[in-house]
Image: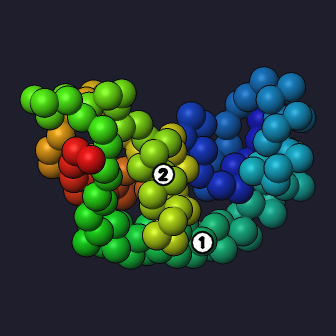
Amino acid sequence: MKVILNENIDTLGHIGDIVKVAPGYARNYLLPKKLAVAATEGNAKALEHAKRQLAYKKNKALEASKNLAEKLEALTINLVHQAGGEGKLFGSVTNMEIAAYLKEKGFDIDRKKIVLTDAIKNVGDYSISVKIHPEVSANLKVTVSAS
């Protein structure tokens, strides 16, 4: 089944793309959540008219993502964990914990967008990537200290 995307979806494409997906995925997920519309002849004609609006929406989302990235890069996250004598943490710092901290500070970022290459298991300073938009990512400064 072919659909026209209304939102950016990492696994499928960008706003305005016509993609082929499984009928169940479109019927049960994309269409009810208004993430896409069916790619019928009428919708394809309406797409040409809506391309300008979608381009504006895409640019607006990109601009908002860049502003959010600047705010996130200025922020330093300070986390306190129990640690052993050599600075090794009991447990580890996860992307869920970082997302919860950001939510407390007023940033609504999904934990899946926080990219941890390796688990943080030691005390110290770390730089973590946050993929805000397909074209924009920010680097967070995380400081982990012992309690």
Mark 1 neighbour density, 10 Å: few (under 14) some (14–19) many (20 or more)? some
Q: Earlier in the sequence, mark 1 or mark 2?
A: 1
Where's the N terminus, which quadrant? top right
Please, what secondary structure does the residue beneath circle 1 have?
helix
> At 86% across and 25% down in the image, what residue appears?
24
Residue 118 spot, x, y in % from top left: 27, 28
Q: Which of 68 and 50 is in front in this view?
A: 68
Location of mark 1 (residue): 57
Location of mark 2 (residue): 99
Q: What's under tag 2, amino acid-wise?
A: Ala
Residue 76 spot, x, y in % from top left: 26, 64
Instruction: For marks 1 and 2, give the one nearer the viewer.
Output: 2
Mark 2 neighbour density, 10 Å: few (under 14) some (14–19) many (20 or more)? some
Q: Nearer the viewer, residue 84 or 94?
A: 84
Going by the picture, which residue comes out furthest to the left?
86
Please, what secondary structure does the residue beneath circle 2 have?
helix
> At 82% across and 54% down in the image, what residue appears?
34
What's the distance in space between the residues labelled 1 and 2, CA to CA? Answer: 26 Å
Q: What's under tag 1, amino acid-wise?
A: Lys
Vertical placement of residue 76 versus 18, above or below: below
**Residue 20 can be seen in this image:** yes
Circles 1 and 2: CB atoms closer than 8 Å: no
Residue 60 spot, x, y in % from top left: 52, 75
Q: Which of 111 and 59 is in front in this view?
A: 111
Q: How is the image coloured?
A: rainbow
Q: Which of 85 and 1 is in front in this view?
A: 85
**Residue 59 can be seen in this image:** no
Is 83 positioned to the left or the right of 64 in the image?
left
Is 43 positioned to the left or the right of 114 in the image?
right
> At 67% across and 37% down in the image, what residue appears?
19
> At 82% across and 50% down in the image, what residue appears?
33
Is 40 positioned to the left or the right of 77 in the image?
right
